[in-house]
Amino acid sequence: LSTIHHTPPPPHHPLLRATSTYIYSNDTSTFTMASADPPEHDHRSGVLQGSDPPSSASVASGGGSFGGGRGRAGGNFPLSSFSSSRPREPSARASHHDYHDDLASVATLPSTGSVAAVAPASVLRNGAAGRAGGTNNDGFSSSSFGNRQHDIEPRNKRLAPTRRVSSADYSDDYRAGDDRYEDRSVLSSSSFGSRVSSVNGGASSTKIASVESESFSYSYYARSLITRGIDAVDAMLPPNKKHRQFTIAVSALVGLVGSMIVSSNPLNGALAPSGRTTSRALKDLAGNAEDGIMDAAPAVVPHSGGTGDFLDDFDQRRRRAADLPDGTVFSEPAHTRMCRTIVDRLDTYETGVTNFQQVIFTESEYVCRDPDAPYTAVLNMFAAQLLHTANNDIGLNVDYTHRCARWERYCTGNMTTIQFHLPDPLSVNAYAFQPGCVDAPSLRTICEGCLASDDPTNPDCVLFPKGYLDATTNTCNLGCYFSQVLPWIRNNLRTVATQWLNAVEARALTFWLRNAAEFSHREKDDMEVAVVSLSCSNDDCDMSMSECVCEFEPLPNWVYAMHVPRSSTNVAIVISPTCSRFGEGCTLHAQELFHFFKRLYPRADITENVITSTSSWYMRMITADHLVCPPGVGCLLPAIARDAYTYVYERTSPTVFTWLTCTPQDYLNRLTLPSFPPAFVEGDCRHLRARLGSWTPDAALAPSLQYNNPVDGYLGCADTNFVATAEDPYRPPTTFRWDESVWATCPVDVMTKAEICAQMDRLSLKRVLFVGDHTTMSQAISFASILGQGSDISLDPAVVPNFSKTVTCTPAHPNFDVTYIRNDRLEEPGTTPSPGEPNCGPDGDHYCYPWSGDYSSYDKRQLLVMNTGYHWGDDWEGYIANFQNFVGRIDEIAAANAARASDVLIFRTSVPGHKECHLHPTVYAHYGEYCPRIVNGAFWHWWGELPPYNDYAIRIINEWNLLNTVKSGANIELLDVWMMTVLRPDGHLSGADAGPNCEMEPRECMLYSLPGPVDWWNHLLVMQLRDVGTHLDDATPLQAWR
């Protein structure tokens, strides 16, 4: 250990006072550079100043490709630039300088002592004092990105004031009066590096690099010596002394000696390093001119050559925390600074000057990295883009490119804000600038008004210079300004969303893994994702604040049930951090929704997350199949980037809350803007019934659930053979009622003849036509039997099963017909089957009697109830094609006969059977009892395929109802009997109540005996008709089925 040969500079050497050393964290894969400070905690998890570094095995060393994996960063490039950082505590905010000072300042680094003492971490939101500098293995000067910082100020807290390093050293290259150097893009670091040699006498930069390199080499060499010493001790010890305690003691002694030697080296006087790193990547080293040390920036080391990677143009690609190479950070967004230059040039322009030198503005780092207010940040960027396009249309030559994360996206992957994702420059070519929208006088008015306003940094002063409402008439007055920007925003966000979907697996497979038995055949493309976004109505809160007024206005649960379809496979509740922290009731509402959705969508994967990344938040909203948002600005921009299934609630009284209501009709056609607070309409119960409830025994209701005449054949066998007793006067399956557990105001009442007659008359319906397989036949027979028309319906397989009955109503209401046509697959094969001679299906073993001709030729208004699914087995592609053809056939029929456009169309969902139904004499209490008994496969008639078939049918119905604006047919309602029926394992043809005379081989555990659970399908059907009639009577909009 005594053979180390090195002659360090004297301790008072000025270079040592600014030399960066290294900080090791408990995460042994990362370290960063820092200046010397007294031992204290630096607010980062696991980093204690003065603590020993980890073993050499924990630290990467050596060469390797840039960013080529953990532990291969090479040389003395700080690995922290490849790892995520944790936020630090907020610092006090610096005071403002002159408002018109375009090059407001940054902190001057001290010549001695702690950097952070003069340059607090809050100088830069992303960690101005929390940056690490070094040299990568290719020899290029580079920097790691520190933690973003939050600054506190009553207004526009996101834009901290800038501070300045003395610019005397750069007076030859930077002239404050020359607007060519207004922004960072016109000063490349290569020209900056060429000045370092003159500032530092031509050799300082090389010496700096050497000092830093030797500093790291010393610590590495010392660790190597310690390791070798331990190995030597182990080798020298005799076998009888190699016990654990002795080895540990000797090794600790060697380690202590090594640490003392390393710490005694002046270059490593702070191996127990500071918690605060150097203030800028381009200002790693600084001194005091009065002490004879000039401000210095690290030189650009010549490229080692030969790699051919993107580092060849590193100066153009890299992203700095500073906005200018001299360390300046702009406190104002680009549009504010652009306006000053535009006003000056307009003054010159009016004197006749038309030739202007180009000046390029780039976005402030505060806008690029703002993690809490994406709405304001994105509008800041497009406000600058509008000024760019408008002034160049005149010829002022004031350009804009945001330059957000152009380096960071390639190196660290830390693209946490939506601003980082936006194309640079923003894509506007597809939408031409409207001629005359912003001429020279208008541009002056916008910029002068913006600069004179209370908050010139607010993008509304550019995008809405006159507001979006006419205050005198309370009508929309959006003007051409924002109308011009709208397609730009939409196009750029959609481009980003497409790229994001291509790069990220946006839809997790968790749902399919949990439900493999039921949905094993489906692909992830079959998934349907709904997003509920919860955020503050306002955009003023910042996570650095101790308190903030977050205006959170939750929606009632029934709203989500109406807008999130029951076919959803994933329902994500995403909460913004500000809403979670400051929104009163926001977190509680999210938790309640999570448990509510678990019950409402039992087959879906429900998630609840606070999304700290605004890029992820926006991408989820844009790419989801369905989006529901309470009032506020959080959803506005994603909403205009979507195509359909978007519900953004808007407060419209006493005036509209946001500009979304004022957007052109083309945008309004793509989304729905319900008024807030939402008003429940009685007819909307059809979206809520039979989804959350349970079966309850009701002996008092049981008599009204019996038929006047028993059903013939196998459907009525159990009822015919039942022997009543004093304890059980009725078959147990006929003694239960359905109770709504959440929406008690939307009950399922028992169907009566008087009620159905009244509803048929109310809607002017003259016939109920049932089309489908055996399950639809049992529903049709149940319907007729409840109305006293169940006799003379033959179930003999040698007889055609189709039938038609006439229901005689009271004189107050006209009679109507009940007709059933068997068609197992809703197909029209062109032939007519006969008993024992089926005509459809892949094996020709199903019955498809023609139905469309009968339906089309009926000359009065009618109710069509249809179903298919049981006879498709596992033929998923066949079901998809057939259902699409079926809906198309409905449209063709309506186009040929206008009377069909006023029909009421209802599709009933398919319900699987129950395994071992003969062992279940009563109902399930909840879905959790049914779920473990789900079965699938050919032996079980592919019952597990029915739920995804239902999901697909619901999706097609949604598209038909909500997206098809040129259809001829009526909307299709949904009769969803799935939840209430899967809870009924009792009452099947082979159920426990069937009796010995009704045994079937094999057991029939799908079809039900009559009367029984199927009757409740018809009770629910009458409630649907009542709701439709309520909407028509009240002239309220009929919300399309979801």
Image (cartoon, rainbow, N blue to C red):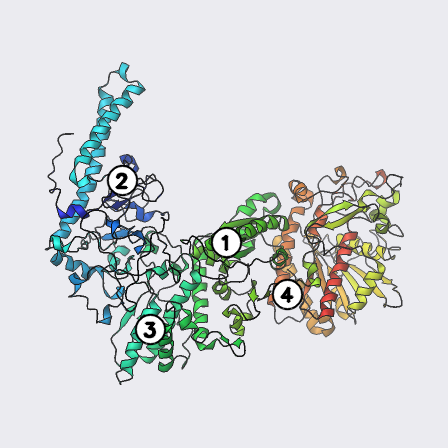
For mark 2, what is the residue? Answer: 39
Residue sitting at x 28%, y 81%: 347
Whether residue 237 is visible here, answered yes or no, is yes
- Identify residue type, mark 1: Ile
Up/down of 531 relative to 246, above or below: below
Tell me how far mark 1 sits from mark 4, CA to CA: 30 Å
For the N terminus, the quadrant is top left
First in sequence: mark 1 vs mark 2: 2
First in sequence: mark 2 vs mark 4: 2
Q: Are marks 2 and 4 in contact (CB under 8 Å)?
A: no
For mark 3, what is the residue? Answer: 339
Tell me how far mark 1 sits from mark 3, CA to CA: 36 Å
Q: Secondary structure at mark 4?
A: helix
Disc ID at residue 961:
4
- Identify residue type, mark 4: Asn
The front one of 51 and 398 is 51
First in sequence: mark 1 vs mark 4: 1
Q: Secondary structure at mark 2?
A: loop
Q: Secondary structure at mark 1?
A: strand
First in sequence: mark 4 vs mark 3: 3
Tell me how far mark 4 sits from mark 3, CA to CA: 48 Å
Viewer-nearest of discs 2 and 4: 2
Viewer-nearest of discs 3 and 2: 2
Residue 157 location in percent, x, y?
Answer: 38, 60
- Residue 730 location, quadrant: top right
Decide if residue 395 is on the left or right side of residue 907.
Answer: left
Disc ID at residue 575:
1
